[in-house]
Amino acid sequence: MTQPFGTPFIGRAGELARLTGVLDRARAGEPRAVLIAGDAGVGKTRVLTEAARHAADTGTTVLTGHCVDLGDVGLPYLPFTEILGALADDARFAPALAAHPAAGRLLGGTDGISDAGGRLRLFESLAGLLEDVAATAPLALVIEDLHWADQSSRDLLRFLLSRGPLQRPQGLRPAPGGEPAPAGHRIAVLSSYRSDDLHRRHPLRPLLAELVRLPAVERLELRPMADAEMTRLVRALRTDTVPDTTVRRIVERAEGNAFYAEELLAATADPLPGTGGEAMPSGLADVLLIRFEHLSVTAQQVLRTAAVAGRRVEHDLLRDAVRLPDDALESALREAVGRQLLVPADGDTYTFRHALTREAVYADLLPGERVRLHRAFAGLLAERGDRAQSAAERAHHSRESHDLADALRASLEAADHAAQLGAPAEELRHLESALDLWPAVPAAELPQDGLDTVTLTLRASAAAAHAGESHRAVSLTRTALARTGSDADSELAVRVRYTLAGNLIRVDRLKAAFTYSSEALAMIPAEPPSRTWVWAAATHVLAARHMGYDDEARRLAQQALRTAEDLELPDARADLTISLVGLGDGTRSTPEGRSRLREARDLARRAGNASVETRALYNLAVGCYESGGLDECLTWLFEGLGRAGRTGLLTSPYALELRYLQSLVLYTLGRWDECARAAAEDAGRLPVAARFATGPALYVALARGDEQAADRARALLDGPFDWMATLVASVILVDAAAVRGGAAEAVDRLRGTLADLTDESGDDRPDIGIRLVALALAAVADTAAELRLTGDMAGARRWSDTAEELTELARSTAAKGGPGSAPGPESRAWLARAEAERLRARSGPDVTAWEKAVAAFDYGDPYELSRCRRRLAEALLAADRREEAAEQARAAHDTAVRLGAAPLREALDALIRRGRLGPAPSTAQDTTALTAREDEVLRLLARGRTNRQIGEELFISGKTASVHVSNILAKLGAAGRTEAVAIAYREGLIEQERERRV
C-alpha cells in the first residue's frame, strides 16, 4: 500500500482506530478479518493505506492484491497472484514458497488447478504458505475492490476465512527466535468493496452474508464524512484560499464523498465558461453514469424523468409524467433501486441515492427532452392546486420550460407560502426569482392587483433582513430607490428611504443612514398625522442616536410617540418607547427602564409586530447583562429566542444579537460546554453573515488551548465589514497575541480594531475598547517584565509608556459620560484589570491593584477572575505573603481545571512549583536526581537567566539561586552552566519550549 496522498488524513479517526486495533490484535496472535464497505470515492483506499502504514511501522508485512473490472471475462485468482508475486520478491519468504509448490503455481498460471482436487490442493497450499509467512513475521493481507473479484478469487477468500489460518490454531510450531508461539496465526485480512455496486443479484452478496457470520470476521461501513470533516478536507486540497461560499457549496454537493469533493473543487479551479464552477466535471459525470448506462432502456427513461423532478419525486407524480403502464414502471423502478441509483423513501417517494447522480443524469438529457419534461411536470403540479411545495416546484419547472408568466405567478405564490411558514430565506429566494422574471413577462400577463417592482423589491429587502442577509437587504432597498421615479407615490418614496436607512444602520453605514432618514422625514409633513410619518420618525430617531445627536433624537421620539398614541399604533409606540429608554428616559439597566421595556414588549405582542417585540426582549436582556444580573439575563434571552423561533425571525438582526448575548452569558458564567454545544448546533443554521453570533464559543476554544481558534476568528473578518464580527474576532485575536507574548501584535490589533469600530459612528470610544486594552496590556506587561529581567531598562520603559497610553484610553472610554453611559460591572472589572496590568508593566505586580481586579470580576466571570487571581498570587509571593498567595493560586487552579482551561492551569502549575505554594501538581516528566526547585532553576538556566534573574522569577534571593546552580552542576557532572544545559537537553531533562502566557 504505497499509494501517495498529497493531503493530510482527515476524519475517519474512529474507523482507522478500529482497523489498527484489529492489526495489533492479529500481531499478538488473534487472527482477524474486516470487510470494509463504502460507496465509490468515500475513502476506502485512503483508510486502508493509513492502516497499512500503521501495520508496516509496527513490524507487520503488508501484502496487497487488487481486483480489476474485466467484465464477464476475469483473470482467475488475480488479487492472490499479485500477493504471491510480492512474496516471491522478498527473500525472507523463499523457504516458505519452496515448501508450498502448489501455491507457487499461481505465479505461472492456473493450468492444472481447474478440477476440484487441484483447487483444494491450491487452497490448502496457499493457506499453509500464509501460515508459514506469518510465523516469520506478522502478516496483513489487503484485498481491494472485492466487488470486481472473479468467482475463483471469491472461493479462495471463502476458504481462507472459513477454514484457513483464521480458523486453525497455531499448533506447536514455535515463533521465530525460539519464543513461545501465540495462540493463533498472526494474520489480518482487510478487504474492501463498493456497497453501491452490489445490486440485488451481485455474486458477492451471498458470500458477504456467509462471511459476516464467522466469529473472526467483522464488517466496517465507511459512511459519508461529516460536513465539518469535509470542510477541512476541501480546504486541505488546495494551497490557495478557497472562498467560504465555494467550500460550503462543494460540501453540500459532495454529501460526504471525498472523491466527489476533489472533482468538484478541481472544476472550480478551471470552470467552464458561464458555469461559475457549478457544472458537473466530465470525469465525475462519467463515473456516475456507469451504473446508469447498465440499466434497461425503460429504466433509463424513468430515471431521466425522475432527474427532471429533482432529488426526490413522488411515485404518483412520476407515474403521470413518464406515462408507462404500472407493471413496466414498477419493473424499471425495481431495477433502478436494485442498482442503488434510487432509494425508496417515506411518503411513497423515491430519492436519488446521491444528488450528484441526479445531476449527472439530468445533464445527460437533450435540450428538447429537458424542456418537454419540465413542461409536463409544471402542468401536473398546476392541476394539483395549492398543495405544499407545489408552487415552488411549479415555478422551477415553468421557468425551465420557458413559461415565464406562470413561473412568475408560481414564484409569488411560493413566496407567500414561505412567509406563512416563517421561512424568510426561502421567501427571499422566491421574491428574487419573481423580480428576475418580471421584465421578461408581457405586461398583459403581469399581476393585476396593483403590485409593482418597487413594492416587491421592498418586500424582498425585508425578507433579506429577516434572513440575516443585511448587506443583501441594503442592496435590494437601493434597487427599490433607483426604481422609484419622480412620479412615484410620495408615501412609497418615503417608505423606501426610511427602509434603506434602517438597513444601513444594520451594516454600520451610519452617516448614510442618517442622510436617508433625514430625506424621508423631509418628504412627509408631521401634519396631518400619518402612520408613514411615525415610522419615518422612528427610524430617524435611531439614526440620530447612532450619530450622537441625542437631543434631536429624544425630542423627535417624544413627538412621534404622542402621534402614535393619537393614531393608535401600538407597535410604533413600543418601538419609540424602546428608543426613549435607550436615550436615558429610565435606562435599560435600571428597574424603571426595564419596566418600560416590558410595557413595550406587551404593546408589540398585542400588535402582532414580532420584530419590535424581539427588539424589546433584546434590550431587556442587555439591561440585565449590563447591571450584572446574568441569571435574569438568561431568562429574557430564552424568551426572546423562543418568540423569534415561533415567528420565523431566528435570523433577524435582533434575534442574532440575542443569540450572541446568550453565547456570551454562557461563556461568562463558566458554562462553557453549553456555550460550545449551542454554537455547534447553530453552525449549520446561521447564514455566513451571522457567524459572529456564536463567537463566544471561540473564546472557550482559545481558553482551552485550541490553536485553531485564532484562524477561525480571522475567518469572521472575511467579506463585507461587520461591526459585531469585527468586535468578536478582535477579542480573540488580541487575547491570542497576548497568550503568545506578542505585545506588538496585540497593540497593533487593538488600535486597528478601535479604528474600524469607530468608523462613521461618531463614538470614538466604544466600550469594548476597555476589554481590548486590558487584554493587550497583559502582553505589554509580560514584555516589560522580561526586558527588566534581561537588564534592558530602556526597552522596559518604552513598553511601560505604551501601557500608560493604553490605560488612559481605557479610562477615557469608561468616563465618556452622558445619560445612561456609566460603566457597568463588566466594564469596571476590565478597567480594574487594565490598571493592574499597567502597574505590572511599570514596576511589577501590585497586590492592591490585583485585589481590586479580583473583587471586580467576582460579579460572575470565573475565568477572568481566575486569571486575575493568578496575578494576585504572583504579587502576594513578591510581597512574601505566601499563605495568601497559595490560597489565590489554588482557587484559580481549581477553576481552571473545572473549565478545562489548560493553558491557565499549566501557568498555575508552574507558579505553584516556582513559589512552593503547596504540593506540586503531578506531571509525567521525570526529573531524575534533581529536586523540583532545581528543575525550575535548570529551565531558567536554559533560557539564559542570570542568578539574580532566576531569583526574581522564583521569588528567592540571588544567593539561594547560586546555591541551586552549583548543586545542578555537581549532579550533572558539568563544568559550567552551558555544559549543564547541553547535558540536560541530551538527557531529556528539559525540552526546547516556548513559554505559554495566559
Image (cartoon, rainbow, N blue to C red):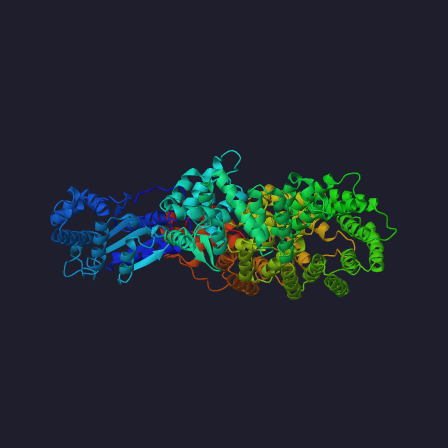
Q: Position of residue 476 (x, y in %)?
A: 68, 43
Front residue (pair 550, 489) = 489
Question: Does 80 appear above or below 682?
Answer: above
Q: Quadrant of residue 978?
A: top left
Residue placed furthest toward the top: 273
Residue placed furthest toward the front: 325
Q: Quadrant of residue 823?
A: bottom right
Residue 731 seen from this side: no
Residue 733 seen from this side: yes
Q: Position of residue 604 (x, y in %)?
A: 74, 61
Residue at image x 41%, y 58%?
Answer: 931
Residue at image x 40%, y 58%?
Answer: 924
Q: Which of the image's four quarters has the N terminus?
A: top left
Front residue (pair 894, 191) = 191
Q: Position of residue 739 (x, y in %)?
A: 54, 50
Left-right relation of 77 to 266 = left
Question: Does 359 appear above or below 212?
Answer: above
Q: How many marks?
A: 0
Front residue (pair 507, 928) = 507
Front residue (pair 686, 798) = 686
Q: Position of residue 52 (x, y in %)?
A: 30, 49
